[in-house]
Amino acid sequence: MDATTKPVIAITPYRIFPAKMGGQKGIALFYQYLGNYLPVNLVCPSDTIVPDDFPAKGFPILGTGISRYTHPRLIKRISNIIKQTGAKTIIIEHPYLGWLANILKKRLGVTVIVHSHNIEHLRFKSTGKWWWRIMRYYEKWVHERADFNFFVTDEDKSFAISNFKLQPSRCATITYGVERTIPPKEEERKIAAEFIRDRHHIPTHHLVLFFNGTLGYKPNLDAVGYILKEINPRLLNQKKAYTIIICGKGLPSEMNNLNEYSNKNIVYAGYVDDIEPYFLGADIFLNPLTDGGGIKTKLVEALGYNLGAISTKSGAIGVSTDITAHKMVVIDDKDWSTFVSGLDYVNLTEKTPLAFFNHFYWGNIAKKAARCITEQV
């Protein structure tokens, strides 16, 4: 950064610290690394505590209720922050505050960038929300009026260009990332494997299959249902030596019998404070998601930890087999017999290719985003 670099205002509509879930990590890590290239100021909910070592100044003014998306006082409050910091660019996370960004653009002449994490109206449609058509109209309106648009996958970018009638020159793919630049050492993985096997009494000869996600989110909950009703019965019939570990909080009451599957090679670990040993110590990540939109952050994390992975096509959107080699096997959605047989084709000995890390390393992602931002000012 030099003295002429113009600050950025990033508007984050929900709390991102501590960053535990994929959405929180996607924002927090993006700005952590972007802060190496541009001065960042976070406008965030009032219950946000920005860590002392985070490379951004926090402005917790949004509140915590629904009014943080609609309150007219936000116009004056954020206008004052723009003048105070000398910012020339606003980045809004998700399209929700697009109305606000558009007003600030007209009044103060700032550049507006929308950082999309998925195509929101399609996500709402896939999860059965009745208001998805309203979101489609609003989402299109926000992206049309932005100066530039960040999308998390090439597929989302292509959809938006076609359906929102955006100029390709005003769009870029800014994906979810990992902090590693190379696979972890085998000794790290060995220690983690011993830890999770001891913790959950898993025999040493068992293949450890792993799923992780917030279970209050319907696509993740559906994926658990596929594991219980489609994948695991087929594995039991094949008499394989394996254990499936399922991690995640928010299990609905109607599925609180998950522990009853312990005699069927399934361990429900619930929410764990430190998920890293599971990513390091498992053998294969299961990704049987069939909807939800965007990129599946846990799949990216799993491959970054050198896990093998097997995924549905919908679950692998944004993660090309061109850069994963044989570490990831992709199967048609809901073809569960092939999904199970595909486990035998996941390469457990080769390492995740360096091409994967070149593409998904947060430092490279942030550098690309910084270049796009400075070109707009």
Image (cartoon, rainbow, N blue to C red):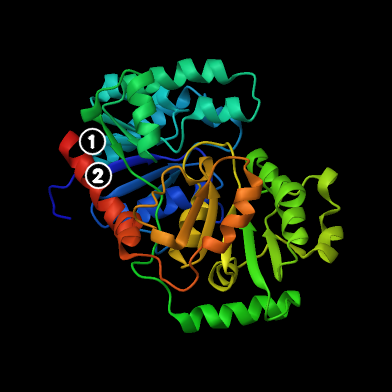
Whether 194 is drawn above or below 18: the answer is: below
Q: Which quadrant of the figure contains the C terminus?
A: top left
Disc 1 residue type (three-letter):
Lys
Q: Secondary structure at mark 2?
A: loop
Where is residue 191 drawn, in percent x and y? Answer: 56, 83
Tell me which residue sits at (51%, 36%) in the image. 293
Q: Nearest the camera: 29 or 106?
A: 29
Q: Residues within 10 Å of mark 2 (few under 14, many from 20)?
A: some
Q: In this rendering, does residue 18 appear at all?
A: no
Where is residue 369 drawn, in percent x and y? Answer: 27, 45
Whether 230 is drawn above or below 113: the answer is: below
Disc 2 residue type (three-letter):
Pro
Where is residue 185 drawn, in percent x and y? Answer: 43, 79
Q: Residues within 10 Å of mark 1 (few under 14, many from 20)?
A: many
Contact (Cβ within 8 Å) of mark 1 with mark 2: yes
Q: Nearest the camera: 104 or 190?
A: 190
The residues bearing labels 1 and 2 have C-alpha atoms spaced at a distance of 7 Å
- Residue at the disc numbered 2: 7
Tell me which residue sits at (76%, 78%) in the image. 201
Whether 134 is drawn above or below 331: the answer is: above
Q: Which label's residue is closer to the chain start, 1 or 2? A: 2
- Residue at the disc numbered 1: 88
Left or right position of 361 against 209: left
Q: Quadrant of residue 145?
A: top left
Left or right position of 369 against 341: left
